């Protein structure tokens, strides 16, 4: 949310959408520009906090009650009653906490001439000197992805994400991919932040150029950790690694290795087909239809990609689970690239 100078904000957004020149080409900051500051409201998730509280609270209570039951066998029945009450209490706590505070929280940040400040963290100014750009994918399912801006204040760091934000291929990425951000903004607001940071630090930022190939990263499906998921904190924050990438050129579609840029398969657009499909997921708890995009590129096996929106009408059934996942932004981009946007449900 941007609160000041709406005309300048819109102008900067349009400039970034045009995105053909690096932000460092903007006029240098004068005394008036250096003094300006702007406030944004980023979003962060609370879901992991509630999960940790409920899970570890239950385990601590479980250990304590079983210890009492072991020392005092006569308290066996009472112990199970207490465990039942604790379980019910934790469930109620989780429901009330989510309804009261929500799954996400707001993180107000301010861009000043000195750096980025975060509300609730007094005395910390994250300098634009040494600012680095990278990519982020949130969660093992890569449901959210975009660009990450890495800032530091001494030994502390702050990573601001741009949800569904795309950089031009000419923009250097100094920071490694990350699976965790302290807060994220929508792409248009993140563009404004980057333009302000670039004016103050010389950070090189380029938007996608006209005719630049679309690149969509294909991730393997996440591994199910089951009841041990809350303990895999390192794995949860580890970004998933893409296995392949689909690039849409002016007259061809190609599949490349995203780590080496080696071309695995390439064909003209007339030889490549994309077909909507559906896969029926069934497990002991639930069953539902998974929208799938099947891409046929000559010279390789069909690519089955899980999409983020359902298809209209009846589509062919896929017997096997989709081999790849994409972010929500790349899912929409792929569907549009193959001219299938009209086949999506609203």
Image: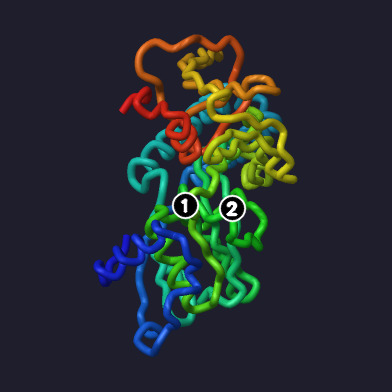
Label 1 vs 2, first from the N-terminus: 2
In the image, 309 versus 300, the foreground residue is 300
Q: Is residue 279 above or below residue 14?
A: above
Mark seen at residue 327: none
Residue 257: image quadrant is top right
As drawn, the label of residue 135 is 2
Colouring used for the render? rainbow
Q: Position of residue 118 (x, y in %)?
A: 45, 69
Mark 1 Cα shell of 10 Å, populated few (<14), some (14-19), many (≥20): few
Q: Is residue 57 visible?
A: no
Residue situated furthest bottom in the rendering: 31
Measuring 53% from the left and 43% from the top, which residue is drawn there? Answer: 214
Question: Residue shown at 42%/54% (left/top)?
Answer: 187
In the picture of the structure, the residue carrying the numbered disc 1 is 210
**Quadrant of the image for the N terminus?**
bottom left
Query: 286 or 196: which is nearer to us?
Result: 196
Q: Position of residue 261 (x, y in %)?
A: 71, 44
Residue placed most toward the observer, 246 or 287: 246
Residue closer to the observer: 6 or 81? 6
At mark 1, the secondary structure is loop
Q: Quadrant of residue 99?
A: top left
Quadrant (top left/top right/bottom left/bottom right) for the C terminus: top left
Percent position of residue 126, x then y: 53, 74
On the image, the x and y values in percent for residue 30 come to 40, 87
Query: 83 left or right of 108?
Result: right
Tag 2: Cα neighbours inside 10 Å, few (<14), some, or many (≥20)?
Answer: many
Reply above or below: 202 against 146: below
Q: CA distance from mark 1 to mark 2?
A: 21 Å
How many numbered marks, from 0 up? 2
Please give the name of the residue rendered at 50% of the width and 73% of the height, measured from the top-left corner: 24
């Amino acid at each position: 949310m941007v609160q000041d100078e709406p005309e300048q904000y819109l102008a900067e957004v349009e400039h970034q959408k045009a995105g053909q020149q690096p932000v460092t080409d903007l006029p240098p900051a004068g005394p008036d520009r250096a003094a300006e500051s702007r406030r944004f409201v980023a979003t962060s998730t609370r879901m992991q906090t509630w999960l940790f509280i409920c899970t570890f609270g239950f385990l601590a209570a479980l250990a304590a009650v079983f210890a009492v039951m072991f020392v005092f066998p006569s308290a066996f029945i009472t112990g199970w009653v207490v465990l039942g009450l604790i379980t019910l209490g934790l469930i109620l706590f989780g429901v009330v906490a989510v309804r009261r505070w929500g799954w996400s929280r707001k993180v107000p940040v301010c861009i000043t001439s000195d750096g980025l400040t975060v509300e609730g963290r007094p005395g910390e100014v994250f300098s634009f000197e040494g600012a680095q750009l990278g990519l982020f994918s949130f969660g093992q399912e890569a449901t959210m992805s975009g660009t990450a801006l890495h800032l530091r204040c001494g030994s502390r760091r702050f990573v601001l994400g741009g949800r569904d934000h795309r950089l031009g291929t000419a923009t250097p990425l100094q920071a490694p991919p990350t699976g965790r951000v302290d807060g994220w903004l929508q792409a248009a607001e993140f563009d404004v932040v980057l333009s302000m940071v670039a004016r103050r630090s010389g950070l090189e930022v380029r938007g996608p150029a006209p005719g630049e190939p679309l690149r969509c990263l294909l991730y393997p499906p996440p591994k199910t950790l089951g009841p041990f998921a809350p303990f895999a904190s390192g794995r949860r924050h580890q970004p998933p690694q893409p296995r392949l990438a689909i690039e849409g050129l002016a007259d061809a579609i190609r599949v490349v290795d995203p780590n080496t840029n080696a071309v695995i398969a390439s064909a003209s657009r007339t030889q490549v087909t994309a077909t909507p499909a559906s896969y029926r997921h069934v497990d002991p708890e639930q069953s539902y239809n998974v929208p799938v995009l099947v891409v046929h590129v000559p010279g390789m096996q069909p690519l089955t990609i899980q999409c983020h929106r359902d298809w209209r009408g009846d589509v062919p059934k896929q017997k096997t689970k989709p081999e790849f996942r994409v972010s929500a932004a790349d899912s929409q981009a792929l569907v549009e690239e193959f001219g299938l946007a009209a086949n999506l449900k609203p």
